[in-house]
Image (spheres, grey):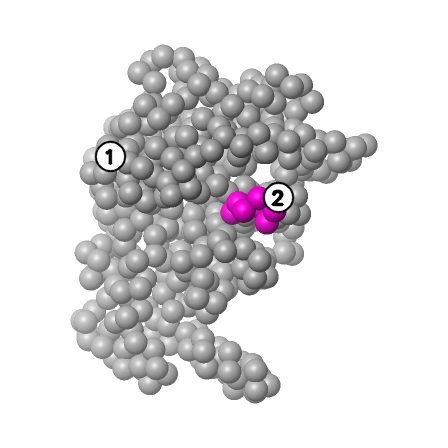
Amino acid sequence: MTVEANYQYAKSLYEKWGIDVDSVLEKLQSVPVSIHCWLGDDIGGFEVNKSELSGGIDVTGNYPGKARTPEELRQDLEKAMSLIPGKHRVNLHTIYAETNGEVVERDQVKPEHFENWVNWAKEQGLGLDFNPTLFSHPKAADGLTLSHPDPEIRQFWINHCIAARRIGEYFGKELGTPCLTNIWIPDGYKDVPSDRLTPRVRLKESLDQIFADKVDERYNVDAIESKLFGIGSESYVVGSHEFYLGYALKNNKLCLLDTGHFHPTETVSNKISSMLLYSDQLALHVSRPVRWDSDHVVTFDDELKEIALELVRNDALDKVKIGLDFFDASINRIAAWTIGTRNMIKALLFAMLTPNDYLKQLQEEGNFTERLALLEEFKTYPFSAVWDYYCEKMDVPVRESWLEEVKAYEEEVLSKR
């Protein structure tokens, strides 16, 4: 059977449950995923005075062909996005500034250093998101930044975050779509601290100073990202979930949930509905932790599907900004982008092809037998036929045929770097 014939058969089965599959695909096409640039060069960036990767972040492997220049990174992103259905966004860090060989300290970075990225995004029809980079720098060598006891170091990072928000505003103005500027810091201690409060007081004061610098909220949206622990901060992280949740609610900022930044027994999917009761918007960094915040490539696993279900069945797709954050230098990086992003979109489609309203009704009625039976049966409904049709409709490779394009690109481009 052809892709079209398989789709029509699958469509007829889903429509028996009141699911308008054509409308589902139209809606799916409107959901952007923010694709992280830093996978393409193992979070190296292009600073002239580049520092070793730090902040409890680790990229393992040495697969050949990583991007060495901004041009190579943009070329690789273009290739990956040609294999991913839909129109999406690209997420940048400050270390991807282009300064024409000039040493520019991070507190002095300006919109002009990202002009090439903006021109490229216009050509590609993409939105851009942004992050200040508070790691891989001499002033972050002891693992403290915005909560640092040294006021001069603390002010340096405050100024850096202020500069980053102005760049985010520039992105939003130029591209006509708001930039999500997300602040994450590595601050914490390896061993049990004798004072948990004082660093958090300093962090709060730093954030207050950062956000006192006004940028136009039509163009820049602020987010703050928590973490449970990291390498070198196993016992205490200043910016905990509780800290940022409280700060976000009080100061009207987005709380960003990274799926790898919680205890292994916690799930982000279980947090979304509670947080949406009190927040107009949330943000996600979807990753895959393996025993710790290891940022493995996103797979089509139960937690990814559950996150997507929470977004869809709670009608929250326009309230939650979806971004990705994973890296793996042991495999082809174009393939990693393609696998992870396609899986995020697959999960959203899977959720949209679930009779969520009827399942909610069964739960309210206490009919748990039928609810469980249907949940299990829909796991083997012909979802893949709809996914294949969507890929064909979006003019990207169907099924695993994208892998041949990646292999050809590796031979023609990556292997020559």
Name the amino acid, label 1.
Trp
- Report x, y in % for residue 411: 24, 37
- Residue farthest to the right? 194
Compared with 316, 330 (above or below) is above
User: Would residue 226 be visible to someone looking at this image?
Assistant: yes
Q: Which of the 4 image quarters holds residue 186?
A: top right
Marks 2 and 1 sit apart, C-alpha to C-alpha, by: 35 Å
Q: Which of the 4 image quarters holds residue 357?
A: bottom left
Question: Does label 2 or label 1 sit earlier along the sequence?
Answer: 1
Q: Residues within 10 Å of mark 2 (few under 14, many from 20)?
A: some
Q: What element carries label 1?
A: helix
The reply to whether the magenta stretch includes residue 248 is yes
**Could you tell whether 253 is left or right of 92 in the image?**
right
- Report x, y in % for residue 197: 75, 35
Residue that mark 1 sits on = 120
- Report x, y in % for residue 361: 51, 82
Between 378 and 364, which is closer to the camera in this rendering?
Answer: 364
Q: Residue 382 carries which label?
A: none
Q: What element carries label 2?
A: helix
Residue that mark 2 sits on = 247
Q: Which stretch appears magenta?
A: 247-254
Q: Which residue is drawn at 81% across and 32% down?
A: 194
